[in-house]
């Protein structure tokens, strides 16, 4: 079938206001809406582990619905088979699925072009009703390479580096009473290198899961340190962050609570994420600097989460403000945490990605939490990314899923005029490309009608907290009871 591609050139600069955090755009952008394979939606990783779907050369990966019905869909209204894709230079390529499978999806793409994720296979899992087994997959030059298991029924790849080393988890056949995901056997973090799959072990408990691998071969993830099912965490056991290097898995520990969770690994081996504090009543952002797990503190409130780190060791995240009045995005560098305010009229913000140029992207939330908008913070300014979306497209960048590379290319998802979820890209342009642009930029969206900046009520705070903390769910897999 013929895929219709919407591509527009965003061409005008926004006027600079006199606000402390000014409204301004530092670049012009090409806006492109990414199509599907005929179905309604595109999808990003929703497992709870951080993913990276955009690489340095601007290639985007993800999952896109086909027109084929998925007979194993677990009650979702979107019951179409979804295939892994790459999108580059305006072309959408179907990576297909392994034989017999309906769904596949990549969770990471390296700068060298390797992708990693999963595909269903045509075998029903005997331990989970009406569920096809999953296999970790690495894609190289569009070709799928199946990665096995450790004797269990399923595996999943989570990340891949420029060398083609793949990490993720694979199941063994040992029963597991405190599994973090709805499989009844133990999970083991793995490293796959040149066709050889290696178990990374655990920190002492039954399960582990590798999230990140850098080009030095350092691996970060989570593992249970023991077999206790009393955790005070959002998983059945007490997950701790680990760093694996040269055959040794090191426990990063916590900030005094039961659990910690990684959100990023830099090329220098620094890890960011969040940890429970003593009492397990709240979380703080942390940085592992190579020797110490540092509590980065908050913007005056009780909670905070680090969400990414660039290769300049600049950390971003989100934090409660004084008296837990709201959440604000932050940038942290050399011991200083700087708040990143929302758009005028909004009450909350969070940061999703930062690059080596100091650009930061994230979301701005209305005070009643009924809407959100993708934003860019740059050189002391905050810009609504919808400013670069032509009004006739009807596309709304909501800031839910966001990626950015060091060239300033931005990608993510948004809502179409009919309510479907599609990916988009925003590519910076300058010179004649901007001068000769033919499409008009949408006027800056009006600020939220709820312009009173007051303390958010507990329900709104709970919704915001749920938005920025991990959710353990595998595509096509029913939630754990």
Image (cartoon, rainbow, N blue to C red):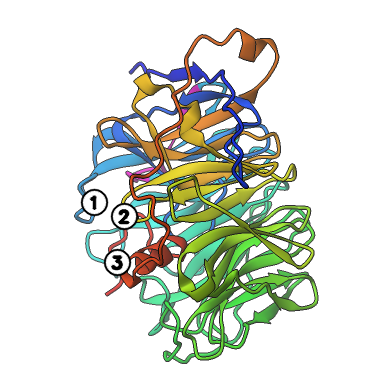
**Marks 1 and 2, how far apart in space?**
6 Å
Quadrant of the frame with the C terminus? bottom left
Q: Mark 1 or mark 3, which has the lower sequence index? A: 1
Q: Nearer the viewer, residue 130 or 417?
A: 417
> Is there CB contact under 8 Å for labels 1 and 2?
yes
Residue 63 visible, this angle: no
Residue 247 in the image: above or below residue 205: above
| Mark 1 vs 3: CB contact within 8 A | no
Left or right: residue 366 versus residue 144 is left
Q: Residue at x 46, y 92 (%)?
A: 228
Q: Secondary structure at mark 1?
A: loop
Q: Relative to 368, does residue 415 appear above or below in the rendering?
A: above
User: Residue 173 placed where, x, y %?
Assistant: 43, 76
Q: Which residue is mark 3?
A: 479
Residue at image location 53% in from the left, 79% down from the top: 239
Q: Which mark is residue 476?
A: 2
Residue shown at the point (70%, 39%) measured from the top left: 406
Residue 296 - label = none
Q: Circle 1 is placed at which residue position?
A: 73
Left of 52 or right of it: where is 128? left
Q: Nearer the viewer, mark 1 or mark 3?
A: 3
Residue 81 visible in the current orientation: yes
Region rendered in magenta: 91-103
């Amino acid at each position: 079938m013929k895929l219709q591609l919407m591509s527009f050139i965003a061409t005008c600069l926004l006027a600079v206001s006199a606000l402390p955090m000014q409204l301004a755009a530092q670049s012009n952008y090409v806006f492109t809406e990414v199509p599907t394979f005929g179905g309604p939606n595109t999808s990003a990783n929703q497992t709870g582990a951080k993913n990276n779907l955009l690489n340095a050369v601007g290639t985007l990966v993800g999952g896109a619905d086909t027109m084929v019905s998925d007979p194993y869909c677990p009650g979702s209204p979107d019951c179409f088979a979804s295939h892994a894709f790459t999108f580059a230079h305006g072309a959408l390529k179907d990576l297909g699925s392994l034989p017999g499978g309906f769904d596949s999806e990549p969770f990471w793409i390296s700068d060298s072009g390797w992708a990693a994720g999963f595909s269903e296979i045509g075998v029903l899992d005997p331990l989970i009703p009406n569920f096809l087994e999953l296999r970790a997959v690495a894609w190289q030059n569009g070709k799928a390479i199946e990665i096995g298991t450790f004797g269990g029924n399923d595996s999943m790849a989570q990340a891949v580096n420029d060398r083609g080393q793949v990490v993720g988890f694979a199941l063994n056949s040992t029963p597991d009473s405190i599994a973090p995901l709805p499989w009844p056997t133990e999970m083991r973090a793995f490293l796959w290198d040149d066709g050889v799959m290696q178990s990374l072990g655990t920190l002492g408990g039954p399960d582990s899961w590798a999230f990140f691998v850098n080009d030095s071969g350092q691996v970060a993830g989570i593992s249970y340190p023991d077999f206790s099912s009393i955790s005070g965490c959002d998983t059945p056991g007490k997950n701790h962050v680990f760093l694996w290097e040269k055959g040794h898995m090191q426990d990063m520990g916590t900030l005094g609570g039961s659990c910690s969770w990684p959100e990023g690994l830099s090329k220098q081996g620094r890890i960011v994420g969040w940890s429970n504090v003593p009492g397990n009543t709240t979380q703080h952002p942390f940085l592992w600097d190579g020797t110490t797990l540092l509590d980065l503190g908050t913007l005056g409130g009780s909670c905070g989460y680090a969400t990414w780190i660039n290769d300049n060791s600049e950390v971003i995240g989100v934090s409660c403000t004084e008296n837990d009045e709201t959440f604000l995005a932050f940038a942290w560098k050399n011991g200083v945490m700087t708040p990143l305010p929302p758009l005028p009229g909004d009450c909350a913000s969070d940061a999703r990605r930062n690059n080596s140029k100091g650009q930061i992207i994230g979301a701005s939330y209305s005070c009643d939490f009924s809407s959100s908008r993708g934003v860019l913070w740059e050189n002391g300014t905050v810009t609504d990314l919808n400013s670069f979306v032509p009004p006739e497209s009807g596309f709304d960048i909501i800031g839910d899923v966001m990626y950015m590379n060091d060239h300033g290319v931005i990608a993510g998802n948004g809502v179409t005029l009919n309510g479907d979820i599609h990916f988009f890209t925003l590519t910076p342009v300058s010179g004649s490309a901007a001068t000769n642009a033919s499409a008009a930029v949408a006027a800056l969206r009006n600020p939220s009608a709820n312009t009173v900046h007051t303390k958010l009520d507990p329900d709104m705070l709970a919704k915001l907290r749920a938005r920025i903390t991990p959710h353990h769910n595998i595509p096509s897999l029913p939630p754990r009871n």
